[in-house]
Image (cartoon, rainbow, N blue to C red):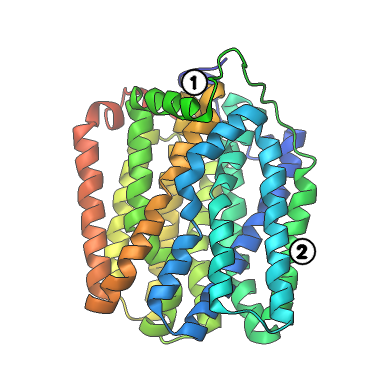
Amino acid sequence: MQSGIDTPKELGRPHWSAPFGVKSFRYQWPSDLATSWAFEMETLILGWYILVKSDSVVLLGIFGALQYFGAFLSPFFGVVGDRIGYRRMLWLTRAVYATLAATILVLSWMDTLTPFIVLCIAGIVGMIRPSDMICRYALVAQTQPSQQLMGALGVSRITSDTARIAGALAGAGSVAYFGMTTAYIGVSLLYASSFFLALKVDDHHTPDLQKVPATPLQDLGVAFTYISKKPVLLCSVALAFFANFLAFPLFLGLLPYVAKNIYLTDQAGLGMLGASFALGGLLASLVLSMNLFKLRASQTMIVAACSLFVLNLMYSHVHHMYLGMFLLVCGGFAQSICLTPLAAVMLRVAEPAYRGRVMGMRVLAIWGLSLGLFVAGPLIDAYGFVFTATVYSIIGLVLTVGMAIIWRRDLWQSHAPANVHI
């Protein structure tokens, strides 16, 4: 059983294509890609539908929050993954995605789709969607050699980054040119493809039944205790929460509002904005996957998080679309440089028997995005987008710097375990 963090000598810097030498990853990667593309297409298609049909930024905020509502239940998904294996979880969740997408397709074809129905289905999807990150990262950690973990996570993130580019453009453009029903044919086919590819994914997970507590609640109790005794894990979860609460609502969930009311553009413009943020993330993932630089993980994620909030502050005061797109590219780069090392550190520190629960706690931080969207909607209605975004950015920057100062021994000092070169 592996514990702790590997030494630089053990990690090395393998070629970017090394993860594909693992058969399971050759099926998991395209399955993740299809799911990510479908996620992004679906979010933009339905987000624009809600905004146009209801003309309410509050409902748009609720829709965005529902996409990640299930983050609250992610620790339980982590328990399930540790008990039954992550591959079975992957099969089940991706079958549900395909079924619900087909439901929206049929309702759209029958012209009976309404914003209320969309919100209900978004709530169901949101209950299980955050578990997808648990399965992806845990399966990578289970099937990849330790020295390839960082590169494999970078390659894995490329699926979501390319999806935010191609999925954003395809999602917004397909509705504009072909209509809702045709667009959802593509979404449904992507989900179906991801399910069948997932059937070929391996899982080397073998739970130690003698150490598994009798109930899921006891499992969760063990996980909370385990994380609380490891400052690196605790700080990583806190940083992920700050980013989701105070940065991502403005870059992601409220993007349709920015496109329509700040830049005065249409679906095509929305797609370009979404693709800009994703382009930055893709560039960062490519840099990380190629292992070109030796990075001190914790220092990297702290600096990148601070950069993200500074860019967020600048973005909130920009009213020109092309300058906004440039800042979105920079913001996407910063968030990927922050969150990928964060995930690698957590997976290396966590023992294999705890990886599902540890990643469940990490995904729980996504609940911050839902809270951020719920709060942002009324604030924008009352005080405007610029004020809300400015307050979010300043608070996020202060909290991140404060955390780095308080836990500097574990997060910032160069000889700290979290700062091993990756």
Query: Residue at point 41% right, 23% down?
Result: 226
Q: Is residue 380 visible?
A: yes
**Residue at left 45%, top 32%?**
346
Label 2 – label 1 distance at C-alpha: 41 Å
Instruction: Work out whether residue 390 or residue 125 is closer to the camera in this orientation and state it.
Output: 125
Q: Where is residue 108 drawn, in percent x and y?
A: 69, 79
Q: Nearer the viewer, residue 328 or 119?
A: 119
Res. 400 image quadrant = top left
SS for dot 2: helix
Mark 1: which secondary structure? loop
Q: Which residue is mark 1?
A: 6
The image position of residue 67, as x and y in percent, is 51, 60
**Left or right: 82 with respect to 333?**
right
Question: From the viewer's perspective, is 67 left or right of 221?
Answer: right
Residue 274 picture location, percent across and down:
50, 69
Which residue in the structure is indicated by mark 2? 189
